Image: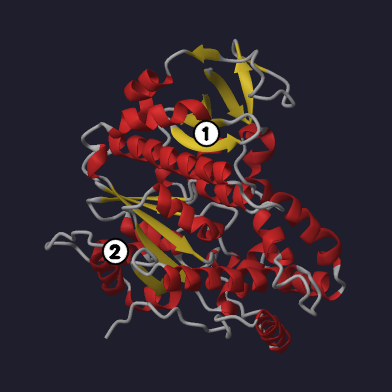
Amino acid sequence: MARLLKVRCREIFLGRGEPSKWLARLSDFVPVQRSQIVNEEVSVLDMNFGDSVPDPVELLQKNGARFTVYSFDSGKRVLGLIKVREGIDIRTAPFLFQAQRENAEELLIIPFDVLPAVADALSEKSTLATVKNIFLYNTGRCGSTLMCRVLDVFDNIQAVAEPYIFALMFKYATRDFPLTSVERENIIMLLRCSVVLLNFHFQQKDPSKTVICYKLRSEAVFVAGLIQKAVPASKTIFMYRDLPGFYDSYLDILFSGSYWRYFSETTLRLDVLFRVPAMKNEYQFVSYAAEHPRMITCPVTHGVPFVFVSLWILQMQKAFDLNREDSANFFHACLTFKQLLEHKERIILKVLEKLDVDVPPDLDSSRIRDVFAIDSQKGSAMQSTRGRGNRIRNSWVGTWERNLFSIVLGHFNGDVDKPNFNMPNSITID
């Protein structure tokens, strides 16, 4: 039985620190009953809380614009949708899932068995049939949030940064044992229904924007094939950055802009003892990168530097494999962070041309250029320290790091064989 309950975010997520980056779970919320907040250890899946919803199809047909997909529980086989407080525009936040979590007011819990009927009913809406879906895959730290912001200035496009449901599918699909055919079909069903629900929400908010671009978390590239099966008519973009730039930007975030903290932790191997185990516990992509069969025997210290070098290589190789095996779907547009910064509106227009998205002939290009003057991740825990104030610092990538890159790339021995590897289908600007 579907249920609707009043909730609030757990206190740990409200400080904008490391916990705000944690993956989205239904346990991020606690029930609120009769205006009283219950103990934070109480689960929203406790059947004693909330009101039963006998007909979730009817509820969502009438009120679907109020709810957005947030997370699911594979054990309980339920999907959770969030309604946020009035006056909050979650789509303008750097990351959708963080805004959903921090501003949650109600949680709608729907059993998996009901989802196909919900998706079918919502899909019958004539306006929903006109939506063009675009999925923006990326390596991370490559300007994808900026790209999302730029696309959002177009009158016919809505761009949404990081609905977490796609990254959760990666966590579900990359366990220690292979997916069964039933589990695989469950993932495709969940993805299809989630996209329909998200589209319904955003289309109801602004029917004039018939193109919806979902900028995904970087690990979603590993389940891109499943996403494409769920939404076969969708278009795809891949954004990437060279390994030195990716590494430098990611470690700047992890070590809060302190080179000496980075140097001391990695030199003394404190990251191996403390940081990496903690990250493995919270982030599936860290375990995936560190323990991948092609990486686990790599003859280097398996600390933070190794993890993120491995992650970049595996993501780039996956994108390369997708393009080689299914070039009709992967990728309709492929570009680098450097190209985005250098060419701005020229490359944006080229991307939209490849995606078959109409651009108004009277487009004011200054609207695009204005976005580049604003830090797209401002206010979030993922904002680079170099984007705060007037600080300018040198790259942390030196001789030791370049040697690490060389060793790990050599051990991997794949198509992605150098730090400045270029995807073969990348856009060029004359």
Q: Residue furthest top?
A: 34
Q: Residue at x 82, y 72 (%)?
A: 264
The residue tagged 1 is 103
Q: For the residue labelled by badge 1, is the local secondary structure a helix, a strand or a loop?
A: loop
- The foreground one among 399 and 129 is 129
Q: Residue at x 64, y 63 (%)?
A: 253
Q: Residue furthest front?
A: 181
Is 233 drawn above or below residue 256 in the view shown?
above
Left/right placement of residue 233 relative to residue 110 reads: left
Q: For the residue labelled by badge 2, is the local secondary structure a helix, a strand or a loop?
A: helix
Q: Is residue 377 visible?
A: no
Position in image of residue 251 (x %, y %): 66, 69
- Please state which amino acid type lies under the numbered disc 2: Ile
Is 237 drawn above or below residue 336 in the view shown?
above
Position in image of residue 42 (x %, y %): 71, 23
Left/right placement of residue 237 relative to residue 176 reads: left
Packing grade of label 2 (10 A; few <14, some 14-19, many >=20) is: many
Task: Name the quadrant containing residue 9.
Answer: top right
Q: Residue at x 18, y 59 (%)?
A: 358
The residue tagged 2 is 368
Left/right placement of residue 86 relative to residue 154 reads: right
In the picture, which quadrant includes the C terminus?
bottom left
Q: CA distance from mark 2 to mark 1?
A: 29 Å
Q: Is residue 44 visible?
A: yes
- Please state which amino acid type lies under the numbered disc 1: Asn
